[in-house]
Amino acid sequence: MAVFFAAVLFSLILSPITAVHSSSSAYNCKSYTVPLRNISAPSFDLTFEIKTQWDITDWTINEARRDSATAFNGIAGPSTVVGDIDISARFCTPSKSTERAETVLVMTHGLGADKTYWDPIFAGGEQYSLVQAALAAGFSVFHYDRLGTGQSTKADPHSVVQFPIQVEILASLTRLLLTPSSPYTLDVSITSAVHFGHSYGSYITAGLASAYPELTQAISLSGYSGIFDYFNILIAGWQSRVAALLDSARWGHLQTGYVTPVDIYADAYLEFKSPYFDHSVAEWASSVKSPYAVGELATLSQTDTSNFNKPVQVF
């Protein structure tokens, strides 16, 4: 069985360019708001609070300095968070029922994005869609807006939207998908899950594999290294700003702890390198980007996955 799930990972990385021409009639999709009630996770009290552009600039300097590991500690101590949240998600499955469709690919996006990362919505975007490639290969797909992004709950960006709760949310969603007669699978009986992550979503996926290895049969981690040697370079290059103060028309409803790279070129710094991308892709990604909660980066940590002995793909 492990060989099968390893083949799933390998085939889908090769297939997106050639397998994305399926029409919508070839598969069925439904969007959901998934209520997660009384969800609990470890959390951390932070030593800082972002209210102004000066605050986020100071935090960037502290995190980006060469001696940040010893000179700056944004964590005051451990805590616990308990609450109710709603997760915006989408489930798709091939119209023609097959055994493959009983395996769901669960996709978790990174910082600055939402669930459309996996199924871009712009002219020509289908050639970049892992969702459409997976459906064309016969698998079911579940992709969602992480807590604090897209149409999901915008919880407190300092005390609630942190790394540990994102792992617990992914675990809760996976359990719901694997539940017999799940209300979120279009009557498809899901028997197994394979998890895909990108960037921050890869860390969350690795966290799931470590804490709940029984929930996944294989993981694919893109934009992932598992180390933090160059974390300060990323933070510095992003030049994050308080989203609500940067563009009040677009993000004025968000609390000031939600931040975003200062412009499209800072966005590109994270994801793209000329001449290896179409500028239209970067322009679309910037136009639909979702600010991230500063608590997410402040609480990100390395994950020990040595207990996970199933197929893993890293690239």
Image: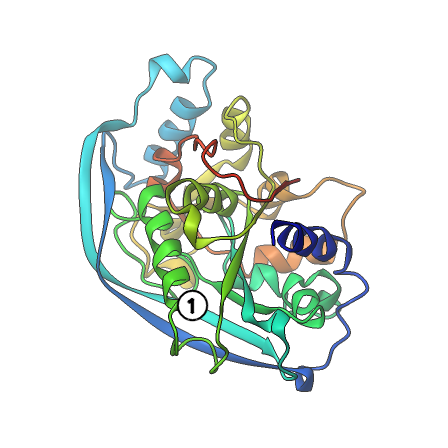
Q: Residue at x 33, y 19 (%)?
A: 72
Looking at the rendered structure, the secondary structure element under dot 1 is: helix
- From the image, tell me which residue sits under label 1: 177
- Counting labels gives 1
How far across and how far down the image is residue 64, in percent? 46, 23
- Give the answer, above or below, for where 285 lies relative to 163: below
Q: Residues within 10 Å of mark 1 (few under 14, many from 20)?
A: many
Q: Is residue 301 left or right of residue 5?
A: left
The colour scheme is: rainbow
Image quarter of the C terminus:
top right
Q: Amino acid at mark 1?
A: Leu
Instruction: Answer yes or no: is residue 159 visible.
Output: no
- Give the answer, above or below, for where 293 lies relative to 36: above
Identify which residue, 44 or 72, lies in the foreground: 44
Instruction: Answer yes or no: is residue 302 visible.
Output: yes
Residue 287: quarter of image: bottom right
Q: Residue at x 36, y 13 (%)?
A: 70
Q: Is residue 150 left or right of residue 278?
A: left
